[in-house]
Image (tube, rainbow, N blue to C red):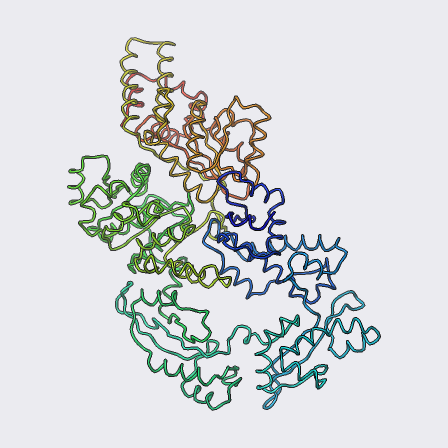
Amino acid sequence: MKMEETESLRFVFTPEGFHPDASGYSEVNRKWFEEGGIPALYAFGAGRKPENLSASAAFLYQVSSSFFQCLTDSPQLELEREKAKVKISETRMDALLNSVPFTIGAENVTAAWIREIFKQLLKIYRKEIRSYDGTVQMYLAEKNQNLHVPERIFFHLVENKDEEGTYPFAFMATYASAGEDGKVHHYPLKYALTQYGNDRKKLIALLSCLNRASEVSPAVKSMMESGELFHPLRFTAEEAFAFLQQVEEIEKCGILCRIPDWWRKKLMNVSLQMVVGEKQPSLLGFDSIMETTPELTVDGMKLTKADIRKLLEQSDGLAMIKGRWVHVDHARLKELLKKMDQAGDTVTLMQALRMQMEQDDRDPDNGEIITNGKWLSGLLNQMRHPEKIKNIPVPKSVHAVLRPYQKTGYEWLNYMGSLGFGACLADDMGLGKTLQVLTYLERMRMTNPDAKVLLVVPASLIGNWVREAGKFTPDMEVNVLHGKPKKQMEQEIREPHFLNLTTYAMVNRLDGLEGRTWDCLILDEAQAIKNPLTRQTKAVKKIPSRMRLALTGTPIENDLGNLWSLFDFLDKGLLGSADSFKKFCSRMDAEDGLEYAKLKGMISPFLLRRMKTDKTIIHDLPDKIEMVDYASLSAKQTVLYRQITDHLAESMKGLSGMERRGLVLASLTKLKQVCNHPDEYLGDSGYSPEESGKFLMLRDLCETIRDKRERVLVFTQFREITDPLAEYLSEIFGAQGYVIHGGVPAKKRTEIVNAFQSDLYVPFIVCSLKAAGTGLNLTKANHVIHFDRWWNPAVENQATDRAFRIGQNKNVMVHKLVCRGTIEEKIDTLINSKKELAENVIGASEASWITEMSNEDLMNLLRLE
């Protein structure tokens, strides 16, 4: 594959590795997977870096090229060949982890993930070099002319702890050679003259790098000319400093220099630290006023002005002070002293956080570092580690037992509220964000009875919130500002309940929402404001509030513009203006990852995300997480539903026996069809999503699944709706899926299963419920959606469990769609409240028990509420 083809590719990072992010089956994807992801990555990293890579492709290139850097760092490479080992240093690992871009699956990239990629790349190298006839250098040169096997010579410079006074450093040159035991050993360089004394060609090859080094390093040239290079040496501080300054050029000649870590990490440079927030301010919030305290430090050790004056008495170079080696640069030290005398001021907490994000850590001459003081460090650490927040009891009026991680989330929300900070709860779908928020609001209601909360949700989720509030916090007053006359809703805003639900669409229409200051403004599915330019987003951001909370199950960092818009709502100013943030993001392609690390550090205190896969936090989740999602009927569905029930009530009069039974069963089927979509009942082909509450709910669920590049199975008992569902899902996912029903031949079904189970992204399969009971193996899916209900738990469970071989590595989310106020909700309630009835009666025959009801009981069951 040509490397430039990767320019159009974006990648998804998974717990197991990575795969191209595709909206379809492009030729580029086919090539990558025909060649294989890891082999392609191997070739990718060995070659020249293409321009204009996506952030995810650039990171994968960085991982692979880092592998080759680690590989070629070993001077034993030529000797070890297929036995080569690769070790990644802590510094390089940190650089890679800091460089993980804001992209899909970024949370899966850990040190273990990178080591596994290295392990797979090493397997390829070992396999290829084993069968390669030439040298390792020739092999690498065929991959990339810039890849070089290092020479076998080392320069060692160490501190001589036993030496006091003139010679505080020791130097020795060594070379690597295979011993009689087959292992690589290091010997003083002088022994090379003996070992290769009779083989001048090998000796010249070994020592050739020294001639190159002597041309760029006066220190090496001097030791070569005097012959001292072949003997252990003692260095003065001046000699060590001169050598260290030349290390970078020496290593370009292929000689590996093992030198003190403080030089590599530039820990010997004096810097001016502006310590912000050493003491707690009198008021909390972004406007808190904090003092800045200037300090001169070296490697984290504080220096006094007297220490600096003592250093200024030394010559430029290296000087020892308080047990540390310090780089003495008179001009720089004088400039830092001047800055220190001028420093010392007050800043707000918001300014302090912004200053750290904006400072240029790459400027070696800047010498000025902004750091957090004791109080501010503790505050941010508490926000980043909510498990440390304790002693906030759950109100007894909450009718639920919170899991440990849910209680942690509840406590974090309270803590953030007490500080006046906006917060984003970004837990995975299915971890109970609704319960955590309702518990937080219940405590707010009890501690501040006059508080007023505005909750903005997609229209399809109103039913869920109303039902969950009634279930978990029944004492909480809830009012819905939707589906009523505008004049009535404006009046209700002037005299609000405690919790007021409205929709994103209504925010534009209800002027009164921005006419009062809400105690808390909450956005559910907060990705709805990802575009800062839409009327909807602008209207939401205008609503005044004391506390702001965003809920999302979608990774918000996939698009940095989306991230800015969300934090512009939550904590305005934290990420600066849109233009300044765009400028900051333009620097994010640097391989040291400083900007990525800064941005992650900036937002992490204000964002709480737990993943279902994180067993260190969430260790008691079942393999199968089941939930009921409540959809509201559209106006058209409501009219049709009532027509059917009214017609049934009239038609049943005077009927009995099989005739009545047939009428009831036919009516039940019609009601189910109307709940799915009016066009299924009417036999039309339009299937407008806005005409079905379930279609809108399906979009809300699948947009989150799409944004995480997960996969879903959608079950229905009606074959006629499988194709409309598949067409609708293709629009949502931007990719094609499949349909399986009784008419799909066995061979085609096998092909569909194989495609779904492959690494190519096939986002969904729509299955008829009966066809799904034939033992499909679809473990790539993360979600099951029962679009309509069979009313027989055994049949539903069979479809779910046979499709998903429970016990796979990931949890399975099972969503059951139910229309509020309809027979679907009433049957669901009946099933859940009377398990024995569900298993013994309902399970025996899906709807036969309903036909045995009296006319009055039957109509009470069917009537829309």
**Residue at the image point whose x is 27% and y is 67% from the top:** 288
Q: Position of residue 85 (x, y in %)?
A: 67, 61
**Residue at the image point whose x is 50% and y is 76% from the top:** 267
Place residue 263 in its image quadrant.
bottom right
Q: Is residue 78 above or below residue 693?
A: below
Q: Position of residue 11 (x, y in %)?
A: 51, 48
Total of numbered circles in the picture?
0
Report the front residue among 225 and 815: 225
Q: Position of residue 182 (x, y in %)?
A: 78, 65
Report the front residue among 459 and 40: 40
Q: Position of residue 800 (x, y in %)?
A: 49, 32
Q: Is residue 653 above or below residue 312?
A: above
Report the front residue among 267 and 812: 267
The outermost residue toward the right is 198
Q: Looking at the figure, which quarter contains the C terminus?
A: top left
Q: Answer with left or right where residue 746 lies relative to residue 609.
A: right
